[in-house]
Amino acid sequence: MGLAFDSTDGQTPLDEEESEGLLIPTISTRGELDEFEQQNIERALQWTLGRYFKPATVFTEHFIRMIHERMFGDVWSWAGDFRKSNRNIGVDKWQIPTALKSLLDDALYWHENNIYNPDEIAIRFKHRIVSIHCFPNGNGRHSRLMADIIVANIYKQPVFTWGSNNFSGKKDARTVYLKSLKEADRGAYESLLGFARS
């Protein structure tokens, strides 16, 4: 039987089959899991530094999956694989490839036609991909790294600060982040754009 970890507000709980995918058998607490995941994410982040990615590379299913696998592949066997169960958030599991293809096509169009400025392209992409909820877990962290890759590696702008980037210990930042995501659900991106640069 897989480990059951409590999920905080805004986190998606894993089902039993997904929790069986834990690759490090010594992990027994949420704190230990968070620590191992963060180490894996840091290695993924290091890999992106100083690289230039063409939009035609970034805005592909292959790249989306590869980044998730780089972020979580040392911890979870299913890293980079689309979820196989439905959640209380996101599209139906069968709609993931279609919804993602639509987002990727839109993002390439935004870029090629200068529809939005770099920050807004990155934030709209982040919001849409987290709304699809492609993976069993790590969707929020993955979407934030994707936004950073878009703004820094495509547009050569500074990465986002995401409310000082502290979601586990700073309740106020997480509350503001979740509230700004809900506003973006209604098509109002100002708060999420502001939070990303705060």
Image (cartoon, rainbow, N blue to C red):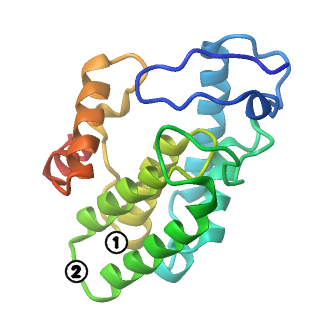
Q: Circle 2 — which element? A: loop
Q: Position of residue 7 (x, y in %)?
A: 53, 20
Q: Is residue 146 left or right of residue 22?
A: left
Badge number at residue 115: 2
Q: Is residue 16 left or right of residue 157?
A: right
Q: Say what amino acid the circle numbered 2 marks.
A: Ile
Q: Which sits in the foreground, 106 or 53?
A: 106
Q: Which sits in the foreground, 12 or 54?
A: 12
Residue in the image at 75% along x and 28% along y:
19
Residue in the image at 85% along x and 20% along y:
25
Residue in the image at 33% along x and 81% along y:
111
Mark 1 nearby-residue class (10 Å; few <14, some 14–19, many ≥20): some
Q: Say what amino acid the circle numbered 1 marks.
A: Tyr
* 24 is higher (above) or lower (below) than 85: above
The Cα atoms of the two marked residues, 2 and 1, are separated by 14 Å
* 152 is higher (above) or lower (below) than 32: below
Mark 2 nearby-residue class (10 Å; few <14, some 14–19, many ≥20): few
Badge number at residue 59: none
Mark 1 or mark 2, which is nearer the start of the sequence?
A: 2
Outermost residue to the bottom? 113
Q: Position of residue 16 (x, y in %)?
A: 75, 27
Front label number (2 vs 1): 2
Q: Which sits in the foreground, 160 or 87?
A: 87
Q: Position of residue 87 (x, y in %)?
A: 55, 40
Asked which quadrant contains residue 82, the reply is: bottom right
Badge number at residue 155: 1
Q: Circle 1 — which element? A: loop
Asked which quadrant contains residue 120, the reply is: bottom left
Q: Is residue 165 left or right of residue 55?
A: left
